[in-house]
Amino acid sequence: LVWMRGYTYYLPAEYRVDSVFGGWRAEKLLEHSVQEIQDKLSAERFDYMLINHRFFLVEGNADLFEGRTHQLQLRFNELLNHNVLTPVEQQGSVVLYRINL
């Protein structure tokens, strides 16, 4: 769960929430190569990622240095283009992605 604002969910499985610090963990993950991201997600046994795109990588909000948000957006798009992430369902700005490893 990335940028989900600490909302409460019933999920009948283990999950990790990245909301206290926004998308910090997901942003940090996107600093790696596509292969390294796949390896990390596989090692952690992730199957899905739920992202609120209203807040994820918008308007320079991940700029710890100039241009970082843009770099992370490009890497996220690489994950989509390589079918590492596949959109499954969308409700407004919230998208559920299947992780294909």
Image (cartoon, rainbow, N blue to C red):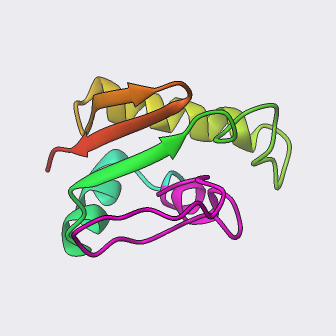
Q: Quadrant of residue 83?
A: top left
- Could you tell me residue 64's position as x and y percent? 82, 55
Q: Quadrant of residue 81?
A: top left
| Residue ID at (81%, 37%) | 60
- Could you tell me residue 42's position as x and y percent? 19, 65
| Residue ID at (47%, 36%) | 76
Dominant SS in magenta: loop
> Camera-side residue: 26 or 4?
4
Span of residues in magenta: 1-29
* Outermost left residue: 101
> Camera-side residue: 31 or 8?
8
| Residue ID at (21%, 74%) | 43
- Could you tell me residue 84's position as x and y percent? 24, 40
Residue 16 colored in magenta in the image = yes
In this view, 40 is above or below 61: below
Query: Is 93 placed left or right of 100 in the picture?
Result: right
- Counting labels gives 0
Query: Is 40 placed left or right of 9 in the picture?
Result: left
